[in-house]
Structures are given as C-alpha cells and as structure tokens.
Image: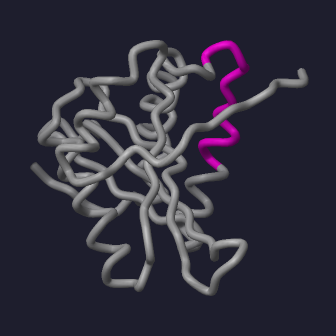
Amino acid sequence: MLVRPLRFSDGYECVRLGKLMHAESKYAHIPFSEDRVWHMMYAVAKDAIRGWCVEGVDLQLQGLIAISTAQYYFSELTTANDLAFFVPERDPRIAFALMNAAETWCQQNGIHSLTLGVTAPVNTLPVGKVYERKGYTRWGEVYRKEFV
C-alpha cells in the first residue's frame, strides 16, 4: 500500500472520489462542485492545505484525507480539522494508513489536536468505532441550520 502526499496532478482522481463521498454524505442534497475540489487541489499545491492519499496498483486513489490548520480562538495552540476523509471501500487498513500519515504530520509540526468529522448518511457508528480504535474520542456534538 503506497501512502503519499496529495499532488495537484491527483485532481481528477480527487474529483472522482469527491463525487462518491458527496453522493453518500449528509451533504448529498446540495450541489457538488468540481471547481471546489480543484480549489482544494490548488491549496494543496501551495501547502495551504495538507493531504495524503493511498494509491492502488492501477494508479487510482483508494482513499484520501485532507486537513486544514488554524489556531484556536482562545489559545496560541494550533489545531487541525479534516476537510475531506474518504475511503470508498471502507477498508480500515486504508483508513488507518491515512490517519497515520495525518497524525505523523501533525505531531512533527507541533499541532495540538486533529479533529475528524463524520458525514456518513444515517448510521455514523461504524465510522466512529474506527476512529475510537485509533484512540480518538467523541468530542461534543455539532448542530447546524441551513438557510438556502
């Protein structure tokens, strides 16, 4: 299994994975934008966003994770959050490899914490269990209100 940083040249594969992720997420009801995926790829190319992927033998991406960083509102410490984390085949080995890549980068760069979200349709329990197996804990709740 080859885990490597995302490259701008992965853009078409990221669009393919993005469409799959979008279709089965809680965001499936809003329009998908290839332009937004390409915007993320430009940010990856400029090191504004960090990302990693697992490349299969056929050169197709088998999963990806992209994170952004920011300082806490109330502290000088920096935190990281996932912008995208998707493994289409739900293979925990691929998920763990991507998590390891992001965690290693965070540790090497003095990041205080990494927060991973779940936008799976209804049953988020399986994804949460994978996170817990890697040492993550449930951290509060998220509430949202849509206006459009």
Above or below for 142 versus 103: above
Kindly give the residue lying farthest to the front in the view shown: 140
Which image quadrant: the C terminus? top right
The structure residue drawn at horizontal position 45% and vertical position 29%, both measured from the top left corner, is 16
Q: Position of residue 29 (x, y in %)?
A: 68, 13
Queried whether the magenta region covers residue 29, the answer comes back as yes
**Above/below status of 123 relative to 86:** above
Res 113 quadrant in image: bottom left
- Residue 14 appears left or right of 70: left
What segment is highlighted magenta in the picture? 28-38
Q: Front-most of 96 and 71?
A: 71
Q: Observer-nearest residue: 27 or 43? A: 27
| Lateral position of residue 79 relative to residue 105, left or right | right
Residue in view at x 47 percent, y 65 percent:
50
Q: Residue furthest right?
A: 147
- The image quadrant of residue 72 is bottom right
Q: Is residue 63 magenta?
A: no
In the displayed structure, does residue 142 sit left or right of residue 62? right
Label total for image? 0
- Residue that appears at 17% across and 44% down: 133
The spot of residue 34 in percent (x, y) is 64, 34
| Residue 138 x %, y % | 40, 44
Residue 131 % position (x, y): 28, 43
At 38% across and 36% down in the image, what residue appears? Answer: 86
Report the coloring of the rendering. one colour
